[in-house]
Image: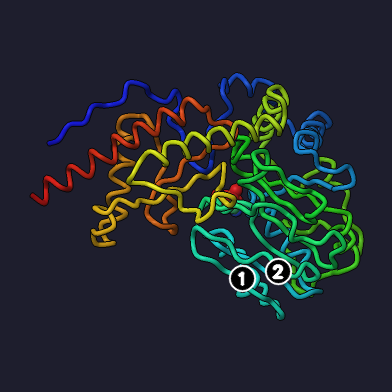
């Protein structure tokens, strides 16, 4: 078998998954020492912790003071579906999708909520729909960063300041690493398990004053499960916005989230987190430039994600093979680097195109990104040589 020389430097942390994402540098189980097992989440100190998650997130992310923020069940999906089920109905809806999660929200709106007057704007993996076609006098549903295609919305300029509709944005793989124009967004969701490197389980929902007004003036005809009930008799319940969650949260996950927010503040807040992600993306850009067998899935530089960086294979040898071989080749490279303990979980999402995806959010160290790219080159060339020898 052809032997290529292994790179000298190993990433200090091989965890490149796009969720749950790698912990902040220096994380250990010690960060959980403030956890009080067996305390009720309704006890005063525990409610204070939940409220601290809300207010510390507001501070780090620069969320305006007049936005309400809640901790929700069921991670980002729970937060986003809570928004869709509560808010949509009184206006026509424009929904955009260009990868797996956007497609899920389209399904929710069209097949589950069965709303009339919906316009769906879809693009292939690697691209986004034409934002000029979106009418923000209707309600607009979209994902800021498409985690499974590595494509992001470049800005919020297409959203009118005096819009009549609500903008409902799944920003789970964008927040903390990308600058978000809060005043352009009415309902924004995220989870702790992405850029913060926290745990799954809980989501966050931020609501603009106009979104709150919608909740207080419109009651959907459809039944709402208890988990989604944040408004009662025309009034928004204050409880979820001060840490009194709808149902029981994991206080262990809360402790972990507080530690991550603490780390974020110590390194310089969202500004520094964005700079870290940008530097990670720049390292990949430099490497892709020099490496002939790989390219970005994102069609244009300005829509390239700096968190979920998705790459496609453009090697003629790969492209000329039957498409049935494509995933097995990608998976073989992933296994090889996993067996070496240099990188785990970096194949593209199973419903995306065969290729590689490296999480580059703020918790990922630049030196680790640089190191893993050398290993990827080694891994791909090794697997390709194996296939070529088998064919010979
Ligand atoms: C853009 C996007 N939306 C929603 C989700 C679902 O998130 P969760 O599993 O936190 O509910 C993910 C997870 O990767 C995502 O990337």
Q: How is the image coloured?
A: rainbow
Residue 141, above or below 263? below
Mark 2 close to ligand 1, CB under 8 Å: no
Q: Residue 298 got which mark?
A: none
Residue 87: x %, y % from top left? 78, 65
Residue 247 visible (yes or no): no
Residue 119, percent across and down?
Answer: 66, 75
Q: Secondary structure at mark 1?
A: strand
Which residue matches tag 1?
Answer: 121
352 lies left or right of 33: left
Where is residue 148 drawn, in percent x and y?
Answer: 50, 53
Q: Residue at x 40, y 31 (%)?
A: 372
- Single out the residue that lies furthest toward the front: 290
Q: Where, quadrant-wise, is the N terminus in this rendering?
A: top left
Q: Earlier in the sequence, mark 1 or mark 2?
A: 1
> Tag 2's secondary structure?
loop
Judging by the rendered image, the residue that carries numbered circle 2 is 134
Q: Is residue 311 visible?
A: yes
Front position in the image: 319 or 226: 319
Please tell me whether residue 192 is drawn above or below residue 11 in the rendered image: below
- Residue drawn at x 38%, y 38% is 290
Residue depicted at x 27% and y 49%: 329
Q: Residues within 10 Å of mark 2 (few under 14, many from 20)?
A: many
Q: In 3D space, how far apart are the residues under numbered discs 1 and 2 (Cα atoms)?
A: 8 Å
Is mark 1 in CB contact (under 8 Å) with mark 2? Answer: yes
Seen as rendered, the residue at the extreme left is: 392
Mark 1 burial class by Cα count in 10 Å: few <14, some 14-19, many 20+: some
In the image, residue 195 sits, relative to residue 158, either above or below, namely: above
Callout count: 2
Label 1 beta carbon less than 8 Å to ligand 1: no
Closer to the camera, 112 or 2?
2
Displayed quadrant of residue 58: top right
């Amino acid at each position: 078998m052809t032997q290529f020389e292994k790179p000298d430097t190993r990433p200090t942390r091989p965890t490149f998954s796009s969720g749950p994402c790698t912990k902040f540098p220096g994380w250990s189980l010690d960060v959980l020492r403030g956890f009080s097992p067996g305390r009720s989440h309704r006890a005063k100190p525990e409610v204070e912790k939940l409220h601290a998650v809300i207010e510390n997130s507001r501070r780090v992310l620069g969320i305006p003071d007049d936005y309400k923020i809640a901790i929700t069940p069921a991670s980002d999906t729970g937060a986003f579906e809570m928004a869709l089920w509560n808010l949509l109905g009184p206006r026509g809806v424009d929904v955009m999708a260009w990868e797996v999660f956007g497609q899920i929200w389209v399904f929710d709106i069209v097949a589950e909520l069965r709303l009339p007057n919906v316009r769906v704007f879809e693009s292939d993996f690697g691209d986004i729909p034409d934002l000029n076609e979106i009418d923000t006098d209707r309600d607009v549903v979209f994902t800021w960063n498409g985690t499974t295609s590595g494509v992001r919305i470049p800005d919020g300029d297409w959203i009118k300041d005096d819009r009549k509709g609500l903008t409902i944005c799944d920003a789970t793989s964008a927040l903390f690493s990308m600058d978000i124009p809060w005043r352009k967004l009415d309902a924004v969701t995220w989870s702790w398990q992405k850029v913060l490197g926290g745990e799954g389980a809980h989501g966050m929902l931020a609501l603009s004053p106009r979104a709150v007004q919608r909740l207080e003036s419109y009651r959907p005809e459809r039944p709402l499960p208890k988990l989604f009930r944040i408004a009662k008799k025309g009034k928004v319940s204050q409880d979820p916005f001060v840490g009194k969650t709808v149902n029981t949260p994991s206080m262990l996950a809360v402790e972990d989230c507080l530690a991550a927010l603490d780390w974020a503040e110590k390194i310089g807040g969202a500004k520094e987190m964005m700079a870290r992600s940008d530097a990670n993306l720049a390292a990949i850009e430099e490497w892709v430039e020099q490496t002939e067998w790989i390219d970005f899935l994102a069609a244009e530089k300005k829509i390239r994600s700096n968190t979920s960086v998705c790459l496609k294979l453009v090697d003629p040898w790969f492209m000329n093979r039957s498409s049935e071989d494509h995933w097995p080749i990608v998976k073989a490279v992933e296994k090889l680097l996993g067996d070496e303990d240099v990188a785990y979980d970096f194949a593209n999402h199973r419903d995306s195109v065969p290729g590689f995806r490296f999480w580059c959010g703020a918790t990922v160290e630049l030196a680790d990104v640089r190191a893993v790219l050398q290993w990827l080159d080694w891994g791909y060339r090794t697997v390709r040589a194996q296939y070529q020898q088998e064919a010979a």
